[in-house]
Amino acid sequence: MQAPKTGNTKKAEPFSWLSVAKPKTSCDIINEARSVLRTVRTRRPFTPTGNQRKLFGSGSSGAPQNRPPSVFSLHASSFDLTESRPVSSARLSPLDHKPMLITSTKDEDSSVFLPKPPADAAEVGRVSSTWAGLFRTASLGNLFSAKVVPRDQNEEKLDSEEPAMMVNSLGSSSNCLAEQRSYTSFNDESKQLLHNKHISRSGSEDFTKGTAGKCLFQLRGERSVNSDGRFADEEQQFPCDQMKNPGTNSSQPRSSGWKRRVTGLEDETRINEWEEEEVFWHVKILPILRELEKIEDNIENLCLACTKLYQALNEGNMLGKRCKRRNVLLKTLYKLVDIDSDPLCLKLAKIILAMKVDGKNLLSACKLAFKICRNEKNDCIIQNDRLLDCLLEVLRTEDLQKNNEALLYCMGAVKFMSGNAVLLNEMVNKGAVEMLLQLMKQINNIKESDTYFSNLSHFLVQLTATLRNLADLPAARCQLVCSGAVSELCVALEQRVSEQDICTYIVRILSKLSSYDDFCAALADCSRCYALFLALLNKHQKQQDLVIRIIFILGNLTANNNQAQEQLFKEKESINTLISLFQTYCELDLNAQTRDHDREGKGKNHPKHPSEAEDVLIKLIRVLANLSIHPSIGAALAAAHPVVELLVTVLEYKSVSDCEELVINTVTTINNLSYYQVEGSAVQDRKLHIAEMLLKLLMSDNMDGVVEAVRVFGNLSKYHEVCDFIIQKKIYRFMIVLLDSKNQDVCFAACGVLLNLTVDKNKRGFLMEGGGIGKLVECLQDFGPADWPLAGLICKTLWNYSENITSAASCFGEDTNTLLVLLTSLLDEKLVLDCSLDREARDCHKLYWEGEFKPVAEKLLDRVQSHHSFLPDGPITPS
């Protein structure tokens, strides 16, 4: 609104609503943003949840024959037993002969073997603690040591890899070993150990006295080891009771001896670790494996045994590839896969993955996890067994290109888990968002010419689908913003522009996140996204689920963001792309509506929700409405005849009862465009036809539609032809009735139309019909102090109406006194400006009062009080 101003020499014209001939004040800009140019909001596109969990959805665009299957059979034969062999980074040289035992002829019964695992748990604990104590003693006092010599490292048989081992033992006075005398063979897969004890009588006596015995263990062809763990050829350190190897030079430098001693200590450490693992294996692990082999039909006991096995492996630090007997362990687990039980398979998958298998076994284990997660009913046991940790570890550590198929099923299992709210939160807490973005970045860095580029498409589908689910969580959204997800998602979208599934999932992620201000701002700052979205729209124009989300994103970007509006508008062929989409989906909607009308004649009802074509049009028109907020873009769109023609077409074939949101968005966009009075305006050319279309909306019972139609009439009533149409069709009566509304926006829009009608002195008499003057005074009384722009609009209407006043009574009738009192009180600054408001609110209140209301109200009050028939200077014109 323009602030009124008197003219002394030239007769001014009456007020009109929203004159744009003069520069706008701050009040004008605020008022116009509120009453004329408005953005449009709409719902986010709805994505229904699939009835079944599949690797690829039913709507996937990829050819089924080229996709990995979601359903498959999995058996023990699916695993590769030869891969289970442990890998060691350091191997000792192989022997060309079998190790020999050195035994004492005096003590024939002194040979000691590893104890047979006791049957009960208490005995297990006792033996285990005894061995632990023994190892501690050996470590502190160097009472014994051993040399581990594996067999031929090139030998590939399962039973050929365990090393032979000579373990020193203590005499009968050592209470931890004397109880066990018999050797037990555990199973045919276990590698047998050779043990020997050689202890002298004096050594036994020294040990019982607390002195370290001089124990000696020797493999044929190897150097002997003293009881303190050092090699016997270190003559300078042990002058007594030493065994020197032939060829040892006594004059060797001391540094060489130190080097040998360090090597000896390292070897001893490895030997001790090997001994501890061997004991732990036979005492803790092997009984559980036996239990697993014995139990056949009792799933509950099998699951319990698997739980104990995982705990024992973790306790003994045997997870991963460190366990020397992992082949025996895995071979036992693989056999159990044939048992059809998801709870059991869950336990098996967790242990197998924790053992760091690779190759075919990694693929089968990931398939096993995928199979379990595919069934939504298993979510509860998955939560309790923490399978997610194992899967995330696989994704973090395994080579993506080398294990593409295995990681595909692993990622698919994680995607299924992300459909569960509890597991979804767990993922965020475990850093899944950053890890997935790192994987996406890794894929983005692969060149399109690389063979792996196309191979990783299926994996990227699962990854983006998981991110789509994670985007629902506030914590995940924060991490996505902070981790630079916008850039990586746009790169992936640009590289995979021809792959519809990936594009759809990424666009779904952006669609969700663009509803939030922080992410929307980050996306708006990514200048490459606008051209990218337009390219996708051109390439996938008839893919509704993809198109609708891109349009929704563009609507979010252009809402109240001038920079985004400019960037989109300046992109090459941007408006033509939007027009092309508009035409395509308008035709689809028109054809669908024709079919629906035929069905209605046969007793079928119109659907309550917007159709796919309607939904695209709703969001597309929203983009146009948002763009029209920008002054230069709005003026250009107002002159774009194809745009206006399409909007009018929607009003022609679509009623508010067919699709409320579509019709109201269309009218809002026309309202925005009708604001611009530019040369060649398509709205101006079609103004009467638009008025006829709006008349149907005015007659509806949809109040939101009515208000939007009245706003358009407020802009179009600036034209004499439209004013004549309003008078001819008695539309002014409807506007007067709307003044009774308790809604300020409705009253404001109706009063704007009445203001423009009063510009023509020949049409002012209509206000006397239906009590128009009284309703205006009532609106002033009800809304004046709370809405100064509306109060100013009412005063302007009364000012125009009373231009040729002869007496106040004849002009305003019985409302004269009320109007005088009301204007006097509203012009009292002390009464109307609430002192209880804070300073900022008070200043804003005063700004509107002084700019919108006070100038015209003072002149109207003077006119009414003077009771003159006319004022010499004529009506006031806005400044």
Image (cartoon, grey):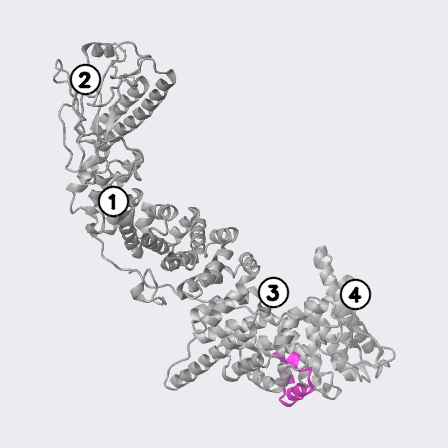
* Element marked by disc 4: loop
Tell me which label, 4 or 3, sits earlier in the chain. Answer: 3
Mark 2 crowd level (few <14, some 14–19, many ≥20, 10 Å Cα): many
Q: Which residue is mark 3?
A: 560
Q: Are marks 4 and 2 in contact (CB under 8 Å)?
A: no
Residue 729 x %, y %: 62, 89
Examine the rendered structure and indicate whether residue 66 appears above or below residue 304: below
Tell me the kind of residue under disc 3. Answer: Asn
Q: Which residue is mark 1?
A: 83
* Element marked by disc 1: helix
CA separation in Å, label 1 and label 2: 39 Å
| Residue ID at (28%, 26%) | 272
Tell me which label, 1 or 3, sits earlier in the chain. Answer: 1
Residue 557 x %, y %: 56, 64
Kindly give the residue lying farthest to the bottom in the view shown. 728
Mark 1 crowd level (few <14, some 14–19, many ≥20, 10 Å Cα): some
729 part of magenta stretch: yes
CA separation in Å, label 1 and label 3: 60 Å
The foreground one among 616 and 381 is 616
Disc on res. 36: none
Disc on res. 828: 4
430 part of magenta stretch: no
Q: Are marks 1 and 2 in contact (CB under 8 Å)?
A: no
Query: To which quarter of the image does residue 189 belong?
Result: top left
Disc on res. 198: 2
CA separation in Å, label 4 and label 3: 37 Å
The foreground one among 100 and 384 is 100
The foreground one among 468 and 655 is 468
Question: In the rendered structure, which segment of residues is drawn in magenta?
Answer: 710-732
Mark 4 crowd level (few <14, some 14–19, many ≥20, 10 Å Cα): few
Tell me the kind of residue under disc 1. Answer: Glu
Tell me the kind of residue under disc 2. Answer: His
